[in-house]
Amino acid sequence: MIVQQLVNGLTIGSIYAMVALGYTLAYGILGLINFAHGDVYMVGAFVAYFCITVLDLNVIVSFIISLVISGILGALIEFTAFRSIRTGSRSSQLISAIGVSIILQNAVMLTMGSDTKPFPKVMNTSVYEFTNITISSTQILIMIVALIFMIMLYFLIYKTRVGISMRSTAQDAAMSSLMGINVNKVISITFSIGAVFGAAAGILVGIYYNSIVFNMGSSMGLKAFVAAVLGGIGNIPGTMLGGIVLGLAESLGATLISAKYKDAFSFIILIFVLLFKPTGLFGKKEIEKV
Amino acid sequence: MIKVENLNIKYGGIAAVRDVSFQVEEGKIIALIGNNGAGKTSTLKTISGLVIPSKGRIFFEGNEITGMKPHEIVKKGIVHIPEGRHIFPNLTVKENLIMSSSSRNVTKNKFYEEMNNALQSFKVLKERENQLAGTLSGGEQQMLAIVRGMLQAPKLLMLDEPSMGLAPLVVEEVFRIIKDINNNGTTILVVEQNAQVALSAADYGYVMEVGEIILHDDAKSLLANPQVKKIYLGENDD
């Protein structure tokens, strides 16, 4: 029973981790919490849904189209909602993000309808049984896709020039521009990458639960935010682990305590993290040397 | 090489720099000295594009660069090493140096060759190349900032307070390196509160006070100038 919950927790945890990375990337580079990120996750799922059901495209093609569109959307959100108030107050950035969130939800609701959509069946779900656990092919798919995405992100951030520019901009934007970096471009790229991760997670969730709805981003957005804070927002490996830990805690809590409180666990965790370790499990203290 | 005309800089309506004009000739070391708050740093920041002037024009090699973005200006060959060094503490020493290729138009191999040559002459940095730059000592960080600036292949290298927070021996070392860089053909504009050390290295100097240039002359003459001696070198002329 507990092992089974570990598998379920890992699956949903991989999703949390992918969405949480969008928060961490935006926070790392601009120090702002992009509360519209959950809705990018929703848009990603809907674009794929539209491509598969209306345009009748192949799943992989739809997946890629959705990632591209979401990537552009991410950069567009940064450009329209955050760029002009980059040095503004935290509260104006927060209001701007909530505004984007409302716009995205309403745009999808008006064009696609407010009812829950059945996400098309894209693969034959087979279930593998081992001694005392069952694991479905969709669960395996989610974990593999999440793993591939996270490895790619790690490689991008730590092993490429773009990654060095992203890290340098996060540390010192003015100095990065003196080094010849087009800081605005790097910030756009960062938001795009975050959005791509959100969209990929949205599609995976559509496949996993077979249903999508225009406001699915709200609760996922909050939970992924908790995952990011838990792991240490701004810290990429920490955020990945934060997502997994949250997924496991939720699944185990639902089994061991009560399934009714499944959603409450994330917020209880958030409260405890903020009380006892506000920098998150893996967040480090700012090192400043003059 | 660089010509600044009637530069005015305001921060929220308060004038930080008023009608400053000066020029830097190719191949020379020019020192801009003055106390804290004189407007030296603002002047450098305006040349490199970090600050937009309220009035005035800046020309580099005959072309106007006023109002261009920092990442465009650095590609023209103006490299600015700001006050406090601003190395990237959470990047490794090597990654800090790799950043320099952003403003360059060279192949990766050529750049790595230059970088490795530079590391050969700065053994301390070579030994620590995979260490986070934030773990270096102040002097080492200043070396890193200078090497990083050099790898940007500047025509004009602007240094803001390179002596700040360094032990006297290290300051000497830093200025020896600055002179070496100049001997290899790079023009230098150095901003310093430490007038003695800056003017000793420079060919020509400008003295700034509360946003204006109050004096300019050959560096040697400035060192002998009673007013400069009194204010900046802490000597009494009587």
Image (cartoon, helix red, strand yellow):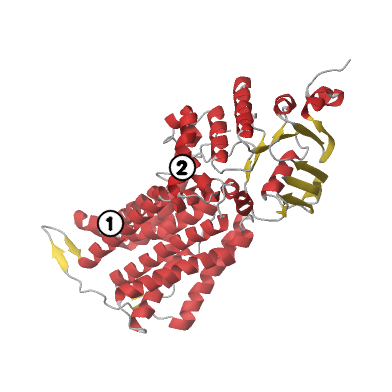
Return the residue nearer the eye: A250 or B98. B98
Q: Position of residue B22 (x, y in %)?
A: 79, 42
| Mark 1 burial class by Cα count in 10 Å: few <14, some 14-19, many 20+ | many
Q: Residue at x 53, y 29 (%)?
A: B140
Q: Residue furthest top?
A: B238
Using the image, name the chain to which the residue with label 1 belongs. Answer: A
Q: Position of residue A117 (x, y in %)?
A: 36, 79
Badge 1 element: helix
Q: Quadrant of residue A89?
A: bottom right
Same chain assignment for discs 1 and 2: no
Q: Residue at x 34, y 59 (%)?
A: A149
Badge 2 element: helix
Q: Quadrant of residue A195?
A: bottom left
Instruction: Check the image and report above or below for A217 versus B208.
Output: below
Residue B166 appearing in the image? no
Return the residue nearer the eye: B207 or B167. B207
The amino acid pointed to by label 2 is: Glu
